[in-house]
Amino acid sequence: MSGKALLFLKRLTSRLTNRLTNLLTWGATLGGAIALSGLVGCEVPVATFQPNKLQATVLGEKNSIDMSPATAEVSAALEELFGTPDDPRWPAALMEEEHLAKLVDMERLQRAAGAVRSDEQDQHFGLYREHCVHCHGTSGNGLGPTATFLNPYPRDFRLGVFKFKSTPFGRKPTRTDLTRLLKEGIMGTSMPSFRLLKDDELESLVDYVIYLSARGEVERKLLASSTELDFTDGDHLYDPSIKEKDPDEFEAQMEVINEIVIGVAESWDKATDQAITVAAPPEDYPLFTRDVGGSPEVYGKLEESIASGRKIFHGNVANCATCHGNTALGDGQKNDYDIWTKDWLQALNLDPKNREQISPYLKLGALKPRNIVPRNLRSGMYRGGSQPVDIYMRIVLGIDGTTMPAAAMKPQNPLGLSENEVWDVVNYVLSLPYEHLSNSAASVPPFAREKP
Amino acid sequence: MSMGRIWSLMFLSVPILGTGMYLIGMLASSGPLALWFPENINPLAVEIDRLHDIILALIGVVFIVTSVALFWFMWKYDATSNPEKAKFVHGNHKLEVWWTVIPAVILIMLAIYQFKVYADVRINRPMLAGADGTLGTADDQPEPPSFEVIGRQFEWRIRYAGADKQLDTADDIIGEVNELHAPKDVRLVGSLKAADVLHSFFIPALRLKNDMIPGTRQIVWFQASKPGTYDIVCTELCGWGHYKMKGRFVVESQEEFATYLERLRKAQFDRSYDNGSPSDQPVSPTEQPAVATVE
C-alpha cells in the first residue's frame, strides 16, 4: 500500500474519532441534563420518613451484625403501620381497640400532615410542616435544618421521652401537658409559643406529635427486637411476600410487631390516668408569688418557709446543691449528658471529646454531644413553667431524660420529704432570683436599684 | 402617532396609576383596596399621622408636578414632530437659586416640626411629681414602666409591675405570652428588651414602633383610646421565624384590665386561673383533665 493511501486512512480515522467524541460529549451533556432534571424535577420532592440509621448502626456494632436487612424490613413494616408523611395511618391493630384508636383523631392527623396548604376559609393544613418541621424534622427526629444551630437541641420525639409533664418519671405526658407546652413555649429554649394558633390547630399538632413519637418508638423497638433474628438464616421480621403463600407465618410476624405497637400505644393511653393531682398546701401556708407583699405576719411565715427550703436545698435528702451548686447557679456538676445523647454515646462507650471517634455517628444523624447543665435557678427562667405548682411537679416528678431525679417523698420513703417541705423548697427556689449572692437576707434584685 | 409620543404617554401612566392607587387606598373604606393605615387609637401619636400627611401632601404635589412636566417636555419636543435641533443651555443662576431655596425652606420647616414630634414620642419621658408634689419642678422623676415586653425568637414575653408599681421586683406579674393588655385612656410607660437578637416592637394602631436591642432597655409610652384587639408585629428581621412573630394587643376598660391583672396574678400560683388550664380547653374524649391545683 502506498504512503498516500495510508495518510488518507489516518486522516479519515482521526476525523471520525473527532466527530464521535464530539457527538459523545454533546450526547452525554444532553443526557446528563435530562437525567439531572429528572432527578431534581420541577416539583417538590415527596416527603419521606428518615429511617433511624443511628440506632440501627449502634445496634449493629454492639451485636456485631449487619443491620441492613433488618432496617429495610423495619422501614417496610413502619410504612404499612404508620403510612407516609403525606398519608399518615394509625396502625390497624390499634384501630381495633377503642381506647387506643382514640389516641389520635384521623381527621386531625390528616390536618397536621402533608404539604402546607390552606383553603378558601383560611383553614390551614400541613400544620406540622408549617410550624414544626424545620426544627423537629419530618420524622420527629429533632434533625430539622435549623436543629444544629439551636441550644438546647430540638426534641427528638422518637424516644417517647418528654421533659415537662404532670406524670411520674418515665411515663408519657398527657395531652394537656403537650398542649400547654405548645401554648406557653419553653422559656430558655428555642421553642416559641404557638398561642395564637386556633385550638383545633393545636389539638391537631398534639395528635401529630403523639403519632410521630409512637412511630419512632415502635421503630426503635422493632430494630432492637430484630437483633435477635438471624436474617442470613432466613428469619424475617416482616415479609409481606409470604402473605399469600404462608399466611400463618405472616400472622406470627404481625403478632410480634403488633405486640410492640400496642405496648407503645398503651403507654400513651395510660398517661392520662397517671397524671398527678397536686394537693394544695394548707390554707395558711405562705406561697412566694402570692404572699410576697402580704402582712408582716404572713411575710414572716414566708421567710421561715424560705429559710427551711434553703436548708433542705443544701441537705442530704433532697441534695439539690450537688447538681445545682451551693449558690444555685447550676454549677454543681456539668459533665453529664441527657438520654438522647447517652442513647448512642454510652451504648458504644464512645468518648465525646474524641472527634474522630464520634464523627461517623454525627454523619448518621447524631448531634454533637453537649453536656446537660443543671438549671441556673437564679435566672428566674423556669422551662416547665413558673407557677409554684410547676416547680412542685419538677421536684416531685423529676425531669425525664435528664439527671434531675424525682424527690423521695415521705409516706413511701420514711427518710423522704414531706409535702410541706417541698413547698418550702418551691418558695426558696422562687425567691432565688431576688436573693443576693453575697447577702442572702436582702431581697432586692440588683437591677431594681437602678433608676427606673 | 410617533413612537416618542407613545413613550411619553406610557411615562404619564406611571404618575396617573400611582396617584390613583394612593387615592383609592386612602378613600376606600373597606375591601381589598382599602390599604390605608389602621385607625390611630393613640392620642399621644396624633402628630405622627399629621406629620406623615403633611410630608405626603408635599411629596404628592412635587411628584405630580414633576411627572406632568416630564410628560409635557417629552410630548412637546418629540423628535418626529420637531424637526428643529435641540439647543443646549448652560446654567441659569436665578432658576437654580430658586429650586434650591424653596426645597431648603420646606426641609427646614419639616425638620423643625418633626423635632417636636420626635421629642414627644421618644425623648420627653412622662414625668411624675417628685417630693414637692408638683409636676414641672426640678425633682420630677421619670414615670417607671408598668409593663415590660421581651422580644425573643419568635415570641413576645410580657410582664406587668405588681402592687409596688415597679418592675424587676418579687411581686411582678407574669403576663401571657404574645398578649399585651392595656387599660383604656391611661398613659402607660413600658420597657422593651430583647433576649437574643434585634427585634422591633410595632403596634400599628398605636403608631408605636421601637427597636429592641439586646442588653439595653428601651422606654416607650402610649395611651390607647379605643377598646378592641389589635396586632403586635415584629418589624426587624430577626431570623427565619420573623414572619410568625405576632402578638395581640388588647385594649379594655380599666376595670377589665384590673380583673385581667388579678387573674394573671392568681394564675402565678393557682392553675385554675390559668387560661391554658385543661378546664378551659376543649378536651378530646379520650382524656380526663389532669387536675393540678394549688389552694
Image: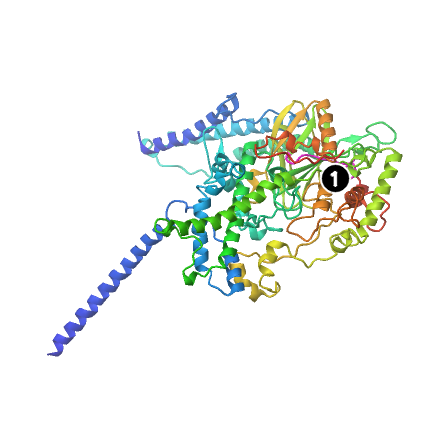
* Residue sitting at x 39%, y 50%: A240
Q: Residue B24 lies in magenta, yes or no?
A: no
Residue with the mark numbered 1: A388
Q: Residue B172 lies in magenta, yes or no?
A: yes
Please state the extent of the stretch shown in magenta in the rendering: B166-178
Q: Toward the viewer: A128 or B146?
A: A128
Image quarter in which the N terminus of chain A is found: bottom left
Where is residue B31? Give x, y as percent: 49, 23
Task: Give the dominant element type of the magenta stretch: helix, strand or loop.
Answer: loop
Q: Toward the viewer: B199 or A170?
A: A170
Q: Is residue B16 left or right of residue B96?
A: left
Note whether residue B237 is visible: no
The amino acid marked with disc number 1 is Pro
Image quadrant in which you'd find residue B275: top right
Where is residue A197? Give x, y as percent: 57, 34
Where is residue A428? Give x, y as percent: 80, 44
Q: Is mark 1 on a helix, strand or loop?
A: helix
Q: Toward the viewer: B121 or A72?
A: A72
